[in-house]
Image (spheres, rainbow, N blue to C red):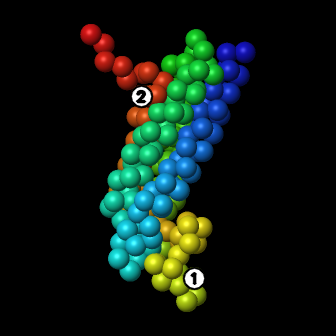
Amino acid sequence: MTALRIGLAVVAGYASMFAASMLGVGIAWTVLGSERAFHEGTVVASSPWSALMCAFALASAAGGGFVAKRVAGQRSRGAALALALLVLVLGHGIAFAQLGSEPSPLPEGKTVADLTFFEAGEVASAPVWYNFTIPWFGAAGVLLGAGCLRCER
């Protein structure tokens, strides 16, 4: 029963992280717009976009850690560690898979300024440093949200 509860906690935490992350992407797009979301004339994410996404990753992962803690009950530390490890493994797996990949071309007749939110999501690419850094923000956020990084007096 304990393993099942930890598994449910990890799934619930990850699902809440995903939902909050998608909300964060929408907010960032609204705040920055297409011109400031990308480096000029490219579909590579800009520094302001990447920094904002790191902040949203930390916040959404903290929420995911909190959810995992609540669902896991007495086994909250184990659930938080499992979720943080999952975030690190999946995140770095995706980062390695994207190494050497070329950005997608813009849709025919479009400029970066003309991209809709969904078109931008299809063609956008992240800097390599970001792909390898974001899993660490996620793992730290999970542990923070689950209360595993408390300062002891």
What residue is rendered at 39% in x and 59% in y? 49
Q: Check disc 1: other Cα within 10 Å, few if <14, some if 14-19, many if 20+.
A: some
Q: Give the mark, 2 or 1, whose residue is nearer the N terminus.
A: 1
Determine which residue is flagged by label 1: 107
* Measured Cα–Cα span from mark 2 to mark 1: 40 Å
Query: Can residue 79 be seen?
Result: no
Q: Choose between 136 and 116: the one closer to the eye.
A: 116
Where residue 149 sits, quadrant-wise, is top left
What residue is rendered at 46% in x and 28% in y? 145
| SS label for mark 1 | loop
Q: Describe residue 147's horizontal placement relative to residue 118 as left or right.
A: left
What residue is rendered at 55% in x and 49% in y? 23
- For residue 90, above or below residue 129: above
| SS label for mark 2 | helix
**Residue 115: percent from left, percent from top:** 53, 76
Split into 4 quadrants, where in the image is the N terminus?
A: top right
Q: Which mark is residue 70?
A: none
Could you tell me the amino acid type at mark 2?
Leu
Q: Describe residue 40's horizontal placement relative to residue 142 as left or right.
A: left
Q: Choose between 120 and 114: the one closer to the eye.
A: 114
User: Is the Cβ of the residue at disc 2 closer than 8 Å to that at disc 1?
Assistant: no
**Residue 56: percent from left, percent from top:** 44, 46
Where residue 9 sits, quadrant-wise, is top right
Q: Which mark is residue 144?
A: 2
What residue is rendered at 40% in x and 34% in y? 140
